[in-house]
Amino acid sequence: MAPASDTAQSKGVTIVTQTRVAPDSAADFESWQRNASRIIATQPGFVQQTVLPPSPPTQLDWVILQRFSNNKDALSWVRSNERERLLAEVRPILIGQDDVHFVEDASGVLPAPASAVISTRIKPGQERPYREWERKIAAAQARAPGFQGYRFEPPVSGLQEDWLAILRFDSEANLEAWLASPERAKLLDEARSFTDEYRTRIARTGFDQWFRIDNSIPSAPAWKQNMIVLMLLFPVVILFNAGVQSPLLVERLGLPLWGALFIGNAVSVVLLSLLVPWASRWLDWWLSPSGGSPKTELGGVALVLAIYVSSLLLAWRLS
């Protein structure tokens, strides 16, 4: 296999890092991550970063996705003295070994509702039996309930010795069911003769494609994201119904209700894709995963609830 820096340089690549932080050092890690993000943003070829905080009990790791426009620039960052200096600063608060992997064409990398990143180090000269076994387990997991997709990546010459697999499922329950299944346990036993090391780490996410508050900080917790979406969706639906759907689409144009509802839903989705990022910037003081002080947490919830009440009053006035 040719070195990664010599092939497919026009393709995007994502550096997938999973790391575990000491429980009492989460705030220190967030502060370090903000500084690291400011530095990586200045690197050649850097496109975007997404940070997914832990979500116990399933996901215990911080998952950091760093997107670059090509392999060459991604490799340069990983091998840079600046990155090594940053890692030296944070190592005292980390637990165990980081998993760092390269995945080309990041369109399929971002986690589904539940994803597992599996890295395998095989014994020398065992590539052929491993590939045959990998095809076997890929066919088995594709039959598992909730299975959504599978990425398989070979090692990166001179940088990544592990073989990488990314499983995507529609829910944590279905992912956990497959990971704990007797069929998978039997297949893993078959692979013991040609594998040296095997690690599985889980990642999960919510409406992350809408919540680009600041890529230097982790994504907001799912329950806060859901509150924001509802806060914006209800008034959009009410106003569109009162101003467009009923008087124009139904009464003037004579569209059936189901057609008018479809148009209304389509318009709502488009508007939310614009409004949610704006609202998340406006509420970034509350959306932080750590939440700040209890007063900040309560203040954010109270504000969103007040907007709920205002929207209900508006709907009542328009009805």
Image (tube, rainbow, N blue to C red):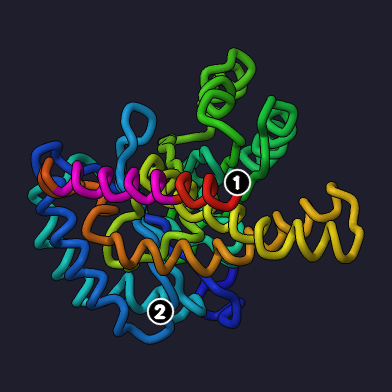
Tell me where the magenta segment starts and ends, as one range. Answer: 296-310
Camera-side residue of 190 and 259: 259
Query: Which quadrant of the figure contains the N terminus?
Result: bottom right
Which numbered tag is attached to residue 105? Answer: none
Residue in view at x 31 percent, y 47 percent: 53
Mark 2 element type:
strand
Q: Is residue 162 visible?
A: no
Camera-side residue of 112 and 101: 112
The three-letter code of the residue at mark 1 reads Glu
Q: Quadrant of residue 79?
A: bottom left
Mark 1 element type:
helix
Q: Nearer the viewer, mark 1 or mark 2?
A: 2
Horizontal and vertical percent position of residue 10: 59, 82
Horizontal and vertical percent position of residue 4: 52, 72
The residue beneath circle 2 is 46
Q: Is residue 288 above or below residue 177?
A: below
**Callout 2: 10 Å neighbours few (<14), some, many (20+)?**
many
**Callout 1: 10 Å neighbours few (<14), some, many (20+)?**
few
N-terminal label among 1 and 2: 2
Marks 1 and 2 sit apart, C-alpha to C-alpha, by 33 Å
On the picture, is 76 further left or further right than 131?
left
Residue 309 forms part of the magenta stretch? yes
Q: Is residue 282 visible?
A: yes
The three-letter code of the residue at mark 2 reads Phe
The residue beneath circle 1 is 127
Count every numbered label the image shows and give the total.
Answer: 2
